[in-house]
């Protein structure tokens, strides 16, 4: 029975899925459930068992894994062996017994079957609980290789991408999948600590110069091996070098402040700034080292800048390990370095007892002291425990190890073979429960020569130049000479481009000081003997001016804040020559070549008197002779002249006062000034004012004179000799009048006057539809008015004569009066055009309408609007033809007179009569039925001529022939008659069929029925 059960179980387990598997001989397929010993979940396995079970995955390509959660057999007696394959011929993973559990066991990628084979052998001794293991399967990761397909900008010949800070970079990548890339995800690690960027393409930039290593990380959709999906197995390590800004130190002007007119040179100096990768940045941040007995304190630095396979091959490649720390009892501490793979080297071991590290605070509190730098290097000459001490720290100050570089206790040779990349950790062991301390920071430095070359770079300057500027006068290499033309600040740009394609500029500014100037002028020049000579110097405020007087020794004076200084020479008797030499302000001195001479003049007596004459005056000198006479400004413009030697004035104007000066060439002789008024002459001024028959005279000068014609006219004009009034003169004629005054200096004046001309008030009026327009033929500018005003609402423009709002057919009389001094008036009349009458009527017809004009004839008819239905209208008569029956037309009539008027009328064309009828045949003709307008007339069309008759009123055909067809017309008798034609065919003649003779037969039976 047990055997049967075993066989049944074995057969069942062959096809089991998601169920428990009991240890047995055979093979099972499944990826879930629990694998138990033969005792199952609750029993022990048996003695003398020797079983081999192979567990295979459900699907090809999967691998089986067993996770032993329980394991306990008889030690060294009951043994399990696990094989990496589908038989005991496969490689052995190991043998397990006692409490030595297999733990987690998985078929490997090179196991083509994906199966695990378990053999269990127990002896005849005792048994125990056995084991339990969770069964699962997974699909091994495929090989995924990421790659960069293209980039903008493209890599250089070394494969590096070189860009400027903030320059945009685009990378396009993909993956090569061993099997299938469906559902794969892509993330870019930009190497700058920022979050990964998803997608196969990425666009980004770096603001900070340096070297960045970019990788494309890919994970596929297989989460059975890795819950995040299987990753790619390579690093693309795309190197991106972001250029450093160059150093412009030395780019400067020889003089950054120039005196006006000076020049200077500016040197352009540029040096590339190398980028050296800090492969191992120090760990900073305070780490407390409290009292402890064997307590271990560890901080690590992650190094990831070397090639992934690179190792430490020489102890000197690790240049130094430095720690900044303080501790109040160095005898507590062991300090060691641990490499990424666990190799160690002691740096310091307990020594020095109570000697401090750094400036420890030994007051028993946890307040940090002051750290000191201790470095360990193979270049050191002594161990730290043998170092000198200094006094440092507090509470109390104590002997402290002197900061410096020391040999480690164990050589860095202990670290040879360690991977360079990974976590390098410093470990400090506090061995005694005495005192405490702090580690503030630590770091380690490798020989930069072992770093990959792409992690450091120095840009090369490929071009350098100064920006064009009009004040640059010379360029020699990278040195320019500048000459600013005026005061101000001038800036020059030095521009360089490196082999990364990055452009950088440096600006150098210089200041051109304001031009310093000075000039001299005389306060008064010339001066006279005994007067002081005063010179005024003006120029740059606060400047110091050097000068000489009459070629003497150099003297100096400082200009005040307004730029002014005065030099006074007391009572000179000869001319004074003042010469400016230069002016100094601050560091600038400007040469000045300016001279001013003050003339010292002699004094003369210039007194004289003037005596008037009838046309001027004469002078009598009472002082020194030899001077010159002249009119004092303003000079007369009336023609008067003066003799400069004698002072005689001639051609003066009577009654005019002239001012005369007598002076010598010396300005020290103030000229004597006298006035003289020419003896007055009589004034014969008059004004003639024209009148309509002569003129009137107005005496504007002296009265008492006599008026005369000059010449005397030949017409009847008369002149009053006392008043100068002209009368009886002819209009438009010019007369000349002379007015004469007697006396010692007789004088006369002649004036002409033209008598005012006649004025022309002629005009014409032209009628309009509401008044009229005026055309002035004579003198314009007059006034129009109604004469009389009819007060009918009409208006007239007084300036233009335009009549508006007049009544049709009314006659208006208009008066026009000129506006001159001799006004004239003329009257004209105008009759307003009569209003025109556009009335008409339309009488409809069958094809349109007839127009009857009841108003003014001669106008024009037109559709309003034109229906464009083929209808026509006679523009002269208004007759509408070719109209559509029943359609309404609107007609406009415009008169053709001076004041056209318009009217509209509508008319509806008569509808046509309905002449519809039908014919129904009869045996001798047909019967008509009128479906349209009754009362019309029926006629044959054509007349058949066969004796058939047609009733003209009813349309009934009689006496027609059989099968004859008759055509008749029906014409209405309405307003717009129409005719309809119909045809009818008379019924055929009936055919008589003789009857068949009836025979009666008897069957011979006397039953009453034949």
Image: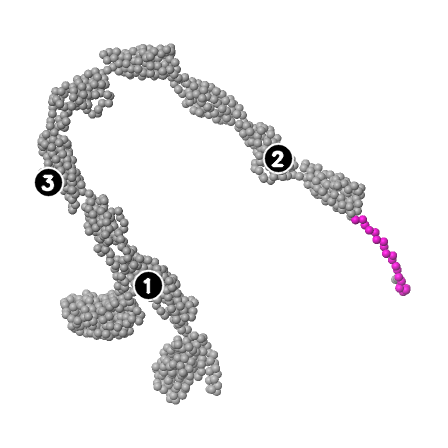
Q: What residue sits 20% from the left and 69% below the top?
A: 375
Q: Give the percent coordinates (x, y) of residue 603.
A: 11, 26
Give the label on residue 880, or none: 2
Rendered position, 811 above or below 283: above
Q: Judging from the image, what secondary structure is the residue with disc 3 in?
A: strand
- What segment is highlighted magenta in the picture? 988-1008
User: Marks 1 and 3, Cα distance to the nearest angstrom?
Assistant: 76 Å
Badge nearest the viewer, 1 or 3: 1
Image location of residue 449, percent across then percent down = 25, 67
- Asked which secondary structure carries label 1, the reply is loop
* Residue at mark 3: 555
User: Do labels 1 and 2 touch, CB within 8 Å?
Assistant: no
Q: How far is the residue under mark 1 from the one under mark 2?
A: 98 Å
Q: Observer-nearest residue: 348 or 717?
A: 717
Read off the residue under disc 1: 157
Q: Which residue lies most toward the bottom here? A: 124
Q: Nearer the viewer, mark 2 or mark 3?
A: 3
Choose top left, top right, bottom left or bottom right for residue 932. top right
What's the magenta bit mostly, secondary-structure-wise?
A: loop
Nearer-N-terminus badge (1/2)? 1
Is residue 732 shown above or below 111?
above
**In the rendered image, is residue 800 in sight?**
yes
For label 3, the crowd category at 10 Å Cα-Cα, with few meaning under 14, some 14 to 19 and many 20 or more, is few
Query: Picture quarter containing residue 707?
Result: top left
């Amino acid at each position: 029975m047990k055997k049967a059960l075993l066989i049944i179980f074995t057969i069942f387990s062959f096809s089991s899925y998601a169920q428990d598997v009991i240890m047995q001989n055979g093979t099972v397929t499944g990826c879930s459930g629990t694998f138990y010993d033969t005792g199952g979940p609750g029993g022990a396995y048996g003695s003398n068992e020797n079983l081999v079970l192979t567990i295979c995955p459900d699907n090809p390509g999967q691998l089986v894994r067993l996770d032993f959660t329980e394991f306990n057999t008889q030690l060294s007696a009951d043994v399990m062996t696990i094989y990496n394959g589908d038989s005991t011929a496969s490689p052995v993973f190991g043998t397990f017994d006692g409490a030595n559990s297999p733990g987690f066991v998985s078929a490997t990628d090179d196991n083509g079957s994906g199966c695990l084979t378990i053999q269990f052998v127990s002896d005849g001794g005792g048994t125990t609980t056995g084991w339990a293991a969770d069964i699962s399967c997974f699909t091994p990761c495929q090989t995924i290789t990421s790659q960069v397909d293209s980039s903008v900008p493209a890599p250089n010949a070394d494969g590096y991408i070189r860009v400027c800070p903030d320059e945009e970079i685009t990378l396009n990548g993909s993956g090569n999948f061993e099997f299938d890339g469906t559902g794969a995800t892509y993330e870019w690690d930009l190497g700058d600590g920022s979050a990964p960027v998803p997608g196969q393409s990425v666009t980004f930039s770096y603001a900070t110069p340096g070297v960045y290593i970019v990788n494309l990380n890919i994970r596929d959709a297989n989460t059975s091996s890795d819950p995040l999906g299987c990753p790619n197995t390579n690093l693309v390590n795309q190197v991106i070098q972001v250029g450093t800004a160059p150093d412009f130190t030395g780019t400067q002007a020889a003089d950054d402040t120039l005196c006006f007119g000076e020049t200077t040179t500016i040197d352009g100096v540029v040096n590339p700034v190398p980028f050296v990768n800090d492969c191992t940045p120090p760990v900073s941040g305070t780490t407390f080292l409290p009292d402890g007995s064997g307590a271990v304190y560890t901080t690590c630095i992650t190094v990831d800048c070397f090639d992934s396979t690179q190792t430490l091959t020489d102890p000197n490649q690790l240049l130094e390990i430095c720690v900044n720390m303080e501790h109040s009892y160095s005898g507590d501490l062991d300090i060691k370095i641990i490499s990424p793979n666990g190799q160690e080297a002691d740096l310091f071991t307990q020594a020095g007892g109570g000697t401090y590290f750094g400036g420890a605070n030994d007051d028993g509190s946890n307040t940090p002291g002051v750290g000191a730098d201790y470095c360990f290097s193979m270049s050191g000459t002594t161990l730290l425990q043998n170092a000198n001490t200094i006094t440092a720290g507090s509470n109390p100050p104590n002997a402290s190890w002197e900061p410096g570089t020391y040999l480690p206790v164990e050589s860095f040779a202990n670290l040879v073979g360690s991977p360079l990349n990974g976590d390098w950790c410093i470990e400090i062991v506090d061995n005694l429960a005495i005192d405490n301390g702090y580690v503030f920071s630590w770091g380690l430095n490798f020989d930069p020569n072992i770093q990959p070359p792409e992690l450091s770079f120095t840009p090369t300057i490929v071009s350098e130049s100064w920006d064009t500027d009009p004040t640059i006068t010379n360029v020699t290499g990278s040195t320019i000479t500048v000459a600013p033309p005026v005061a101000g600040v001038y800036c020059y740009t030095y521009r360089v481009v490196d082999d990364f394609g990055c452009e950088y500029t440096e600006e150098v500014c210089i200041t051109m000081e304001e031009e310093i100037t000075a000039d001299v002028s005389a306060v008064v020049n010339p001066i006279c003997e005994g007067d002081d000579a005063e010179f005024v110097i003006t120029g740059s405020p606060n400047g110091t001016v050097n000068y000489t007087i009459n070629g003497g020794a150099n003297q100096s004076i400082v200009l005040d804040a307004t730029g002014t200084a005065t030099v006074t020479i007391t009572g000179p008797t000869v001319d004074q020559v003042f010469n400016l030499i230069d002016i100094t302000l601050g560091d600038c001195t400007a040469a000045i070549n300016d001279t001013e001479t003050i003339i010292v003049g002699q004094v003369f007596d210039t007194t004289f008197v003037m005596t008037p004459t009838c046309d001027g005056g004469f002078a009598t000198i009472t002082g020194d002779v030899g001077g010159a006479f002249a009119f004092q400004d303003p000079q007369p413009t009336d023609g008067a002249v003066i003799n400069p030697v004698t002072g005689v004035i001639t051609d003066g104007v009577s009654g005019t006062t002239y001012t005369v000066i007598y002076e010598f060439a010396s300005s020290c002789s103030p000229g004597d000034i006298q006035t003289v008024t020419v003896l007055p002459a009589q004034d014969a001024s008059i004004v003639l004012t024209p009148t309509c028959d002569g003129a009137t005279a107005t005496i504007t000068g002296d009265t008492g004179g006599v008026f005369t014609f000059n010449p005397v006219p030949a017409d009847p004009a008369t002149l009053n000799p006392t008043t100068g009034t002209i009368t009886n003169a002819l209009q438009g004629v010019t007369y000349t009048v002379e007015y004469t005054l007697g006396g010692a200096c007789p004088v006369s004046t002649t004036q002409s006057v033209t008598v005012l001309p006649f004025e022309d008030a002629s005009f014409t009026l032209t009628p309009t539809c509401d008044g009229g327009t005026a055309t002035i033929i004579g003198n314009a500018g007059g006034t129009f008015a109604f004469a009389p005003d009819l007060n009918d609402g009409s208006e007239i423009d007084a300036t233009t004569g335009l009549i508006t709002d007049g009544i049709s057919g009314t006659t208006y009389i208009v008066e026009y009066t000129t506006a001159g001094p001799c006004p004239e008036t003329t009257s004209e009349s105008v009759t307003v055009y009569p209003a025109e009458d556009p009335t008409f009527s339309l009488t409809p017809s069958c094809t349109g309408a007839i127009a009857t004009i009841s108003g003014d004839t001669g106008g024009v008819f037109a559709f309003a609007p034109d229906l464009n239905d083929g209808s026509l209208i006679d523009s002269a008569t208004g007759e509408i033809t070719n109209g559509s029956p029943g359609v309404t037309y609107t007609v406009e009539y415009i008169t053709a007179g001076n004041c056209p008027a318009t009217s509209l009328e509508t008319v509806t064309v008569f509808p046509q009569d309905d002449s519809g009828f039908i014919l129904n045949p009869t045996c001798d003709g047909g019967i008509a039925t009128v479906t349209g307008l009754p009362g019309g007339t029926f006629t044959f069309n054509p007349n058949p001529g066969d004796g058939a008759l047609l009733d003209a009123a009813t349309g009934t055909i009689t006496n027609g022939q059989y099968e004859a067809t008759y055509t008749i017309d029906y014409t209405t008798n309405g307003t717009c008659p129409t005719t309809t034609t119909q045809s009818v065919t008379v019924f055929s003649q009936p055919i008589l069929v003789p009857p068949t003779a009836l025979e009666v037969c008897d069957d011979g039976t006397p039953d009453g029925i034949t």
